[in-house]
Amino acid sequence: MESVGEFFRQVRETKGLTVDEVAAKTRIRSDFVKALEDGNFAKLPDQVFARGFVRSYARSLGLDEEDAIHRFVQSAGAFYEKQDERERLKVRQVEEERKRQANRKAVAVAIGIAVLTLIFLLSREQSSVLRRSTSELTSNKRSPQATREAGEPSVHQEPAPIPIPAKSSEVVPPAPTKPAVEGRATEPAGGHAPVVAAKPEPDLVSTVSPGTDGPLGGISIEGAPASDGQLVLDLEANELSWVVVQIDSGSPQEALLRPGEKAHWKGQDQFILTLGNAGGVKAELNGKPLKPFGPSGKVARDVVIKR
């Protein structure tokens, strides 16, 4: 059985009617009438409206409406089955995206709790170290007072004067003294006050670890130049999306692009796109990026790309 579009065209031409005359008679846009005759169902509205166009077209030509609907189902059934499958796929994709967002929120909350716990533990450890350091410092400051209370001589006592023998021309050398022992008093011969050798404070040594700079990297990607007089369209999917492309005046081509997949077409004058997920693809024309076609999850129809 011939397609409904060919059947309508033959009857219209037999009756000597033009596309514009049929459009005026049926109140259907002329581009929809032409798309119906060409079998370009991607340019037609949803299936319910397309069936109404078929009935109006058949009525204007004096044809049986039910027979015309039967021919339409035979011609466009496969296309609308794929469209229904794409709609189901789009709904499933939206549901999966909502689940991914919920998972990302849960992961963010878990990471936040882990970071707060780590900060709390580090604060406790730092406070404990600070208390130990303060306690040791206080103990070191109290040790000289404890020494004085124990009856040991203080290091700040003035030495007693050395007695000078009367009427003597000889120089009396001082008596040898024992070296001072760290932390204890030594009493020299001759009546000197005892001297305590203080323990030197240890030096503080700070270490500095050198930083390292991470490697810098960048990749510049340029599109390949097109041949003289040609248009080159490149699509890259970042989300699951179906695409219908009409190159110049040719037949529509369909593609289902998964994330990371690319598609490449060449033409002379223009491309007409229908996208099931307008925000799910990035496009370049002759190597130059194009503006986004719309938000994610929305359908974009009859997008014309030309010079």
Image: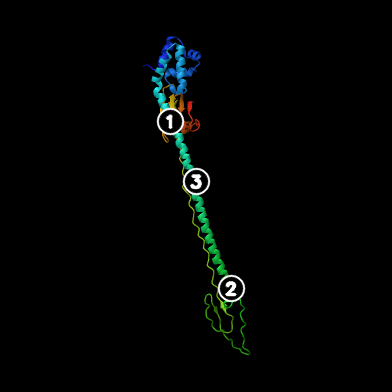
Name the amino acid, label 1: Arg
Residue at 45%, 20% (x, y): give it. Answer: 50
Percent position (x, y) of residue 62? 44, 11
Q: Which residue is mark 3?
A: 109
Residue 56 image position (x, y, % from top left): 47, 15
- Which residue is at a point 57% across and 67% down the rendered structure image? 138
Q: Is residue 163 above or below residue 143?
A: below
Distance Cα–Cα, label 2 vs label 3 = 56 Å
Residue topped by disc 2 = 145
Among numbered discs 1 and 2, the one appearing first in the sequence: 1
Q: Is residue 243 above or below residue 58?
A: below
Q: Dot 2: what SS?
A: helix
In this view, the residue farthest toward the bottom is 167
Q: Give residue 247's quadrant in the image.
A: top left
Q: Amino acid at mark 2?
A: Gln
Confirm whether residue 50 shows in the render.
Answer: yes
Query: From what the image shows, is residue 173 above or below residue 307?
Result: below
Label 2 crowd bin: few (<14), some (14–19), many (20+), radius 10 Å: few
Q: For this rendering, which residue is in front, 175 or 53?
A: 53
User: Residue 184 lies in what quarter of the image?
Assistant: bottom right
Which of the two residues, 154 or 102, is positioned nearer the viewer here? 102
| Disc 3 element | helix
Separation (CA) of disc 1 from disc 2: 87 Å
Q: Which of the marked residues, 1 or 3, is nearer the chain's N terminus? A: 1
Q: Check whether the beta carbons of the residues at disc 2 and disc 3 lie within 8 A of each other.
A: no
Residue 226 shows in this picture:
no
At 50% from the left and 50% from the top, the residue drawn is 115
Give the residue number, with chain letter if any, for mark 1: 88
Secondary structure found at label 1:
helix
Disc 3 residue type (three-letter) = Val
